[in-house]
Image (cartoon, coloured by chain):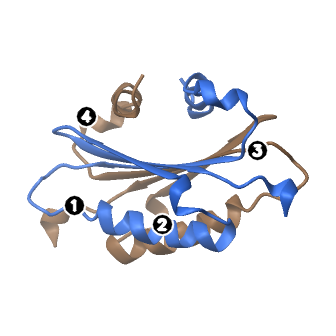
Chain colours: A brown, B blue
């Protein structure tokens, strides 16, 4: 399955309301768990970069973090403001 | 399907060689295609952030970009250097 297919299949029901959405995923496959995760810090910095390009409301950001033995996956979902109102 | 499941299912055959990998996906669902895409610029800045945390070899980065009418998906795959050698 291609990534594009994944995003199509994962379309949420709320997507029927046309909205600009930005989704950022960071997946880290780790061979060793001896190092502390840097994903939380990375997340904060990635968001700072995104905010340079889009007008992001803090309330419009949802964060999801999953991990198992082999990898950690950080997901940021951002509902973008309607650009036609700008 | 959860994201974690997606990453498990998309495990490449080369993953049998234990390697640290970092994968970054940026998906932008667009309601309008009148604006130019900012994903290419965003990509450069995201990479700059990642490089603050990990030692990234330019040759170890592969970039994939897919788009259809509704969204664009940018994928960065980074093979991380073996941390045990540091």
Q: How many residues crowd mark 4 within 10 Å: few (<14), some (14–19), many (20+)?
A: few
Q: Which residue is mark 4?
A: A16
Q: Which residue is mark 3?
A: A30
Same chain under badges 1 and 2? The reply is yes
At mark 4, the secondary structure is helix
- The verdict on a common chain for dots 1 and 4 is no
Q: Nearer the viewer, mark 3 or mark 4?
A: 3
Name the residue rendered at 72%, 41% in the picture.
Answer: B19
Relative to A16, does residue B34 appear above or below in the rendering? below
| Viewer-side label of 2, 4 | 2
Q: Nearer the viewer, mark 1 or mark 4?
A: 1
The chain holding disc 2 is: B
Q: Disc 3 and disc 4: Cα gap in Å?
A: 37 Å
Query: In whole angstroms, how far apart are the C-alphas of marks 1 and 2?
Result: 15 Å
The chain ID associated with circle 3 is A
Residue B29, percent from left and from top: 28, 46
Query: Could you give the CA–CA distance between mark 2 and mark 4, rounded to whole angstroms?
Result: 29 Å
The residue at which mark 1 appears reads as B37
């Amino acid at each position: 399955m291609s990534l594009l297919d994944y995003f199509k299949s994962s379309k949420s029901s709320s997507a029927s309301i046309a909205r600009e959405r930005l989704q950022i995923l960071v997946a880290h496959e780790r061979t060793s768990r001896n190092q502390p995760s840097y994903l939380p810090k990375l997340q904060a910095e990635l968001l700072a970069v995104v905010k340079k390009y889009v007008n992001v409301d803090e309330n419009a950001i949802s964060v999801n973090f999953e991990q198992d033995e082999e990898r950690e996956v950080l997901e940021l979902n951002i509902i973008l403001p309607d650009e036609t109102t700008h």
